[in-house]
Amino acid sequence: MAEHTQDWAKVKKSYLMVGIALFFCTGLTLALGLWAPFDVGPPGPTPGDYVIGLAVATFKASLVALIFMHLNHEKSLVYKTLVFTVLFFLSLMVLTLFTASDPILEQYDTYESTNGKLIEKL
Amino acid sequence: MEIPYEVKPRRDTGLYNAKLGVWLFLASEVMLFGGLFSAYVFLRAGVQDGVDNPWPWGLNVHKDYVWLGFINTLVLIGSSVGVVFAWVALKERNWRRFQIYMYSVVACAVVFMCIKGVEYNSKLNHHHGIKLLDNSVMEGTILDKTDRVRFEGTTVSFSIQGALPAFLKDLDDEAFPTFTVVDAKNEDGSAVTLTSMSELKKWFLQERRRVAGELTGERKRYRSEIASGAETPTPVSVTTSATLKAAEPFHLHANPRKVIGHSDTGVNYRDGSKVEGTLISDDVLFEIHEVDMQLVLPQKQRDSILWDVVNDEGAKQEFFAKQQKYYETFREYYAERNEIMPEKMLRGHKLNLHYVHVGGHGDDHEHGDDHEHSKKGEEKHEVEVHSSESKPSAAGSKVEGDGGHHGTITVPRDKIKFMGNHGPRYGNYYAIYFTMTALHGLHVVGGALVLLFFVVFGKKLYLKNPEHLANRVEVGGLFWHFVDLIWIFLFPIMYLL
Amino acid sequence: MSTVTVETTDQSHDDHDHHDHYEPFWKKYIFSTDHKTIGIQYGFTSLIFLAFGFFLMMVMRWSIAYPDRAVPLLADWPWFQAWLDDGGKVTGDLYNMFGAMHGTIMVFLGVVPLAFGAFGNYVTPLQIGAVDMAFPRLNMASYWFFLLGGVLMFVSFFLPSGAAKAGWTNYSPLATTTDIHYGDLFWTGQTQWLMGMVFLISSSLLGAVNFICTIINLRCRGMTWMRMPFFVWAMLVTGFLLLLAFPPLEVAAIMQLMDRMAGTSFYIPTGLNVSGMAFDAAGGGSPLLYQHLFWFLAHPEVYVLILPAIAIVSEIIPCNTRKPLWGYKTMVYAVMVLGFLAFIVWAHHMYITGMGPAISTFFQTTTVLISIPSVILITSLLISMWGGSIRFNVPMLFATAFIPMFGIGGLTGLPLAFSLPDLHLHDTYYVIGHFHYVVAPGTIFALFAGIYHWYPKITGRMMGTRLGHWHFWPSLIFMNGIFAPMFFQGMAGFHRRAFDGGKAYEQISNQVFAEPNSFIANICELLRVIEPDAAVRMIDLNIVTSGAAWLLAVAQVPFIINLFISGFIGKKANSDNPWNATTLDWATPTPPPHGNFITEPVAYRGPYEYSVPGADKDYTPQFEDGPTALVEDNGAEEVEEEESHA
Ligand code: HEM
Ligand SMILES: [Cu+2]
């Protein structure tokens, strides 16, 4: 088995580095959330902020998945299972959203549907 | 009989059973949390401007508890590192080191859950909100459980079919009155009296059986009359309700969610039970901290009934002054970029940035919260907000009693559309926040128990077949990392965005 | 072992063989970890639930056929006092409760556990030559979770609120607000339905992990992927469907539980009114969210209902036609494609929820696409029979009947795949007819076939043929008698879930189905369904259907007798392989002992080598060494390679 001959000191070092990177990124996430200079777009959480926040989270998550969960060298069967799982998860999320974004009826008057009349100018 | 490939991987798949198993399990977990994340996105994207409760901003909800979320993230990441090190220790056949790492992982889990408890406690017990009929919202604390209708009952009536009547839950157990059943006699002719809850329940079950029996008999008769060709069979008549009279008036704290309506003389429960007597009070005592007008059309905000309820001209002025300032920041932002400000920015979830303090502060804890919150507002948008210490105008609001509760107001119940603590019921953000974090917490507890099991009872297996234990720890670790991974996403979407 | 005690009866096994030869009764039959015992436990439990679901249906059918007559026999039962009206008639509440629970019980407690839990558990490890499931204790846990869920569902009938009443789909906000007036919301049927579902889902998830692991990792030597019987392939795909589709339903159930118990409004829109009163919730939720999460499971679930059935039939047909399964590989790929597509068609149940044309086109397309693999499967089975010398024994009768019945169910589904006809047919009896053709004369027939087929392996005795015929022919007739009229009623506009069978809608129910004195009218007259010389109205078909349903119950009597007595007095199976089948499950002793095989099984060839030219008999089992018939079978080297490793 390959693992018996592995150099554990090296492995431990890489785990430690990943741990530190994760700590750092968590700090970064918080800073992004709290500090105005990091706020993208108009004040408050806007799509730009979502993208940045989720990008950092995704980066962290992939570190965990790749290094801690050994997905950087796993058997093909595991990859196959996970690929399909992720595909189905995405279809659940995306198709569900699509059905909501393409309704036959506008059920309520919204700012857009009333061409701005719903709310008078301030 | 031995199952093959429990320790050694199978040659063509390269996996031992448990590892394959845990990956499959994790796949289903991906779908589980995937479903919840989808629900989150669906609900958040589906908020109808001006109709539904706006999706609050995580930072505003958690205020200084954001730090707790941050610490929790670090704790979980730390524990993840601990698990891989524990696994390496096993691979290096170092039991002692394995123990140390594994126990610290479990300790991390305990810390995580404790912090979670603190967070939950603050939301469930210290923060409340009241939405008035015109959708204006007051945030603060409901005092002394006054969300319940206080009532002095003398007579109750209810059905003796089906479930126990709902009002029983709202009775004071200690001061249980002596009830006499109206129109009923014991065998010796004395009145039927019930002196405790358990007696009442026992009596109810007895009566229920009796009524069911009577009903069966009556219906049999009725059907046989029909069968024998009777033109107008005597209808089935069985008394299926009972009335109890209390010897002395008793106190009732009626849960508004179980009640359809109440008046000065009676409370009607949803399940049909009725309590008669006199109303003591149905006013809600509320310590108000913040006002939120996001759901009120801007041109109607000045006439909102909220200002009648608060009855504090100074606070009102201050609110609109701050609101103006706040709009300015938006105007500036878009003016700088030469863009037109989309009006819906002002109606969307942005506006809850400017909760405004009214009233003084009863308790220091809340005080700290608001302070922190205002500071955040300042940092983020350079809105100049009065620091909460200088709040002269607000002290003029109606003050109930004296001492502690400054800024306590009385909210008439007929003006209230919705009220509650910041628990899952308060809105969809809270609902999904509690559901996801609680489910995640369950995973933490479950994972920690499994890991604890490995370290407490693993020695025997370690001595027999250390590789087997290492496999188990690897598999348990995979689950643990997954739990960490979920939290990595939960932290930003629940606390920051 | 220095002192030889009398109890040490079996000395042939040495110490490292951890065989417990003596197992106490409770360990052997109740808390057993043996996949075969668990399979039988699943089988019995689910048969009981099937019977119970059938009973509920018979009461419903009474209410539909005779909405203004007292239910016979039941009116004096104490339990029914709360739910029948004074005259002994079925109330709307009772009908709703029985309808919801009939659906739930049949799907989650009857067919899936019988098909996947019982047959899957019993047969899969045998067919791949494994000693047991990969995680035997997990397997046991999954049975007990299932039982717990089932018991919760059953007990909920006896709560003051009765069992769930909002349909097996449990759509919110109806399901959220049903029985909301009870003081103790937790002990209402609607809440207990959710609790029961959480257990059933957990059980299915554990089961699915176990099945997939077993199939992937515990195949015996030589059992390469393409040598697995189709049954095993179908179980693998079914396992994946359960594994990945059930969690979203668990989410849906948890969120509905929160809505009921914690007052959240995941599925409660802003401003909801219930019985004329504003509903006390924060609002902002979406009823459609529930439907999405529900159907994300429930569409794959219909394949969970049907794939094991196809699996069983595809074992029985080659065996009894003495021909290889036609297009084995095509079927394998088809079932995989089907499994994949099953995840992206769910919103075809939601065409009328206001989905726009773009997204609805997507779902129509995928839905039509998924019919292709289904047709491949069924066509392959049909072609497999072509030119065979067919043995029409009882399992084969059921298996043969499965094909046209499933065919009718499938073809009548096509109109529902398109949003335009679906607008008309949605929620009518047409839909009820359509899916019942798939699950009742379809799946249930396949399950019967499976019981007759594997019975000799389980008990060592054959089930009686004559009783089998008495079971099959009436069942076939009455099944069609029940479900065929539903298509006509549905197209005429009969709405489902109507406890008076559509009587209240006279314009619909009085439409003429057959003119007076026509052939059909004459038959109906003969059966006393209509007055002499009257036309057959659509609503008269209710009586035909209901009558057929009760007669169907009678037709199950021979089966029940057969099932119980054949174990004692049935003809002894003449060998361990009475049907002369080829798969590994027939290589075991009868009944298979704990650990299944006496000698280590090896698969030397593909699963369906029947009537191989030049062979000495008309079947060459997988476990028989020798040259293989198929040129493209490349598993042979692998056996050798593994042998050299071992
Ligand atoms: C073989 C005999 C069966 C008969 C005669 C039968 C009959 C019925 C009837 C009369 C209804 C109610 C229709 C309505 O009022 O809308 C119904 C509903 C249903 N049945 Fe069956 N059924 C049978 C077997 C099955 C099986 C085997 C399954 C599932 C695997 C099943 C699943 C369902 C479902 C899911 C519903 C819908 C319940 C609802 O409306 O929520 N049935 N069935
Ligand atoms: Cu479907």
Image: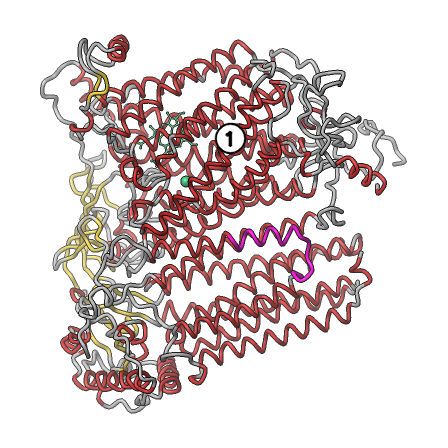
Q: Kindly identify the residue that appears in the image at 49 percent across and 44 percent down.
A: C341
Q: Position of residue A44 (x, y in %)?
A: 37, 77
Q: Position of residue C171 (x, y in %)?
A: 33, 45
Q: Quadrant of the C terminus of chain B?
A: bottom left
**Residue B212, quarter of the rendered image:** top left
Q: Quadrant of the N terminus of chain B?
A: top right
Q: Kindly identify the residue that appears in the image at 12 percent across and 23 percent down.
A: B234
Height in image: C249 above or below B375?
A: above
Q: Using the rendered image of the protein, determine whether residue C263 is visible from the camera's viewpoint.
A: no
Q: Residue furthest right?
A: C2
- Residue B312 is covered by the magenta coloring: no
Q: Kindly identify the residue that appears in the image at 63 percent across and 16 percent down.
A: C461
Disc 1 target residue: C45
- Residue A76 is covered by the magenta coloring: yes
Q: Kindly identify the residue that appears in the image at 70 percent across and 17 percent down.
A: C618
Height in image: B8 above or below C634?
A: below
**Residue in the foreground of this view, choosing between C406 and B453:** C406
**The quarter of the picture showing ligand 1:** top left
| Magenta residue span | A70-87
**Residue C409, quarter of the rendered image:** top left
Exactly how many numbered labels are in the figure? 1
Q: Position of residue A78 (x, y in %)?
A: 64, 52
Check disc 1 and give the amino acid type: Thr
**Residue in the foreground of this view, choosing between B238 and B29:** B29
For disc 1, the chain is C
Height in image: B482 above or below C288?
A: below
